[in-house]
Amino acid sequence: MAKVKKYLVLALVIFVAVITFLPFLWMVSASFMPTGASNTYPPKLFPEKFDFSHYQVLFSRLNLTRYLLNSIIISLGATFFSLFLNSMGGYAFAKFRFSKKESLFKFLLSSMIIPGQVTMLPVFLLLKNMGLINTYWAIIVPGMASIFGIFLIRQYAFSIPDSMIEAAKMDGATELQIYLKVILPLCKPILVTLGLFTFMGTWNDFLWPLIVMTDSNMYTLPVALANLSSEHVQDTEMLMAGSVITIVPVLIVFLALQKYYIKGIMMGSVKE
Amino acid sequence: MINKTKLSAVALFLGPSLLIIALFFFMPVIAAFAMSFTDFDIYALGNLDYLRFVAFKNYSTLLSDPLFWTAIKNTFYFVMVGGPLSVAASLAAAVLLNSKFIRFKGVFRLIYFLPVVTTHVAVAIVWRYIYHPRFGLLNYLLGFIGLGPVDWLGDPNWSMPAIILLVVWKNFGYNMVIFIAGLQNIPEELYEAASIEGASAWQQFKHITIPQLAPTTLFISVITMIGYFQLFAEPYVMTQGGPLNSTLSIVLYMYQEGFRWWNIGYSTALAFMLTIIILIGTSIQFKLQKERNG
């Protein structure tokens, strides 16, 4: 009986894994099939011979190098600035002593329930007035600080013993020196987590880049891909190649640092 | 006597992040609220002299706009069916992976998690072909058990289920990770005591697992609901809101009104309707949970 149960559970686990993985497998296979070969019945799970031409066309004729570069610059830029600003804010909320600190933080947290879409039009108009539409800054600047980021750092910074900060103060370190030499190195794990969230969130984001990047030279990969998919509906294999290129960089980053990502989810789900 | 941090240090450390949040979140929220009472449109965009205060006109127009009600209906369909399905799938996957029979748990967890981190747009494009009525993988597989073929994205009755299926597939891994941690916090003794008394696996699940996970489930339900109310990328890429507006979501409608037609006043009114709906939804969930806990 126990044995039957064991195999049943195992079969289920593998079944779910196959279902989860199948779309990825098909995407990669189709991207290597010659044009038209993926539109057959029955569907083929593996290419009969490998055809790299879709990747070549994407990079040579369809400007994908530029979009890839845009995505990399924007995601790295957003990650860099958000790490600095959020870690300073989060550290201050965890360790500084000033009046109204707790109520200010509670106010910030409770405002997270307002969906970001509310701010889209005013932020768009603001950026337009600042002349930032169709620049990398249009995505980087609004994402430089986030309530969630401050929250994440604050939770972690609580665990830093006050005595370490006091000791540095005794040695005559200024607040800025303490932050740079004591706090940042100790916060490394949570900085990796937040950096990962910011990088992947920026990379995968669609709605905001769609709004602020109207010049096709400034598209990020998801916007370019969506655009491509409405212009080349019939080119299944090429669209799959484009999807692969869009997904692979985030997957690599995630696979390398997945431990930090899971930890971040856990921290985000712990309520006070 | 506790030493207060110098005000200059507080300003230096909190200033930059709070400035950004104020400038790009709080002020825009207020501005959007103000705009929702104006007829801000493409003419006002060119010259602010055309801007007029219209009081509640945008809101009253919304209430008599059939497309608004279609978007509300579709979004509720998505949230009410897709949300619980998502949470149930996550819980089932978590219980499955938590089983003592399974080895290589890390590998399976990783596979289950992969869809979570992949780009919405890419996944939506891939699934558009998986849903292809003639050549798609899904109809092919359904053929083995004698079902279909279904015109997933072309039939207004199937388009929303298709989007729900895709979103459940994409998201179940996220909440699964939180559920697994919740499961591991349940004391083993509870199950031991129950099996000594002869409780079946299902009874244990119902009377131990579910109640013990209640706080986790509440948290997951709330964040899932808030996220699902903001459905956008999938219908944008897969169906453009069609066929026959069957997948037009609130945010997609808001995007079209605001950024395609530049009906800015109207679009911000839509955004506030969405906010109100999310606030009501969240408080209902907290209330339900309270009642259940007596």
Image (cartoon, helix red, strand yellow):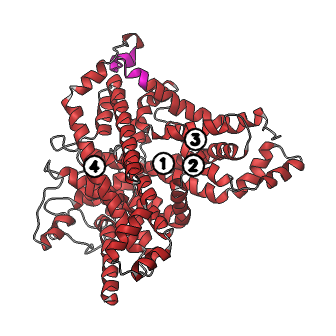
- The amino acid type of the residue labelled 1 equals Thr
What's the distance in space between the residues labelled 3 and 1, CA to CA? 13 Å
Q: Secondary structure at mark 4?
A: helix
What's the distance in space between the residues labelled 2 and 3, CA to CA? 10 Å
Question: With A233 as the anchor, is B187 left or right in this view?
Answer: right
Mark 1 sits on what residue? A202
Image quadrant containing the N terminus of chain B = top right
Mark 4 sits on what residue? B80
Q: Going 18% across and 31% down the picture, which residue do you hit?
A: B66
Mark 2 sits on what residue? A79
Query: In the picture shown, does residue B253 fall above or below A33?
Result: above
Q: Going 38% across and 52% down the picture, which residue do you hit?
A: B221
Question: With A3 as the anchor, is B149 left or right in this view?
Answer: left
Residue A142 is situated, as x and y percent measured from the top left of the image, at 52, 37
Of callouts 2 and 3, the N-terminal one: 2
- The amino acid type of the residue labelled 3 equals Ala
The mark lying in front, picked from 4 and 3, is: 4
Whether residue B139 is visible, yes or no, is yes
Q: Magenta stretch containing residue B39, yes or no?
A: yes
Residue B53 quadrant: top left
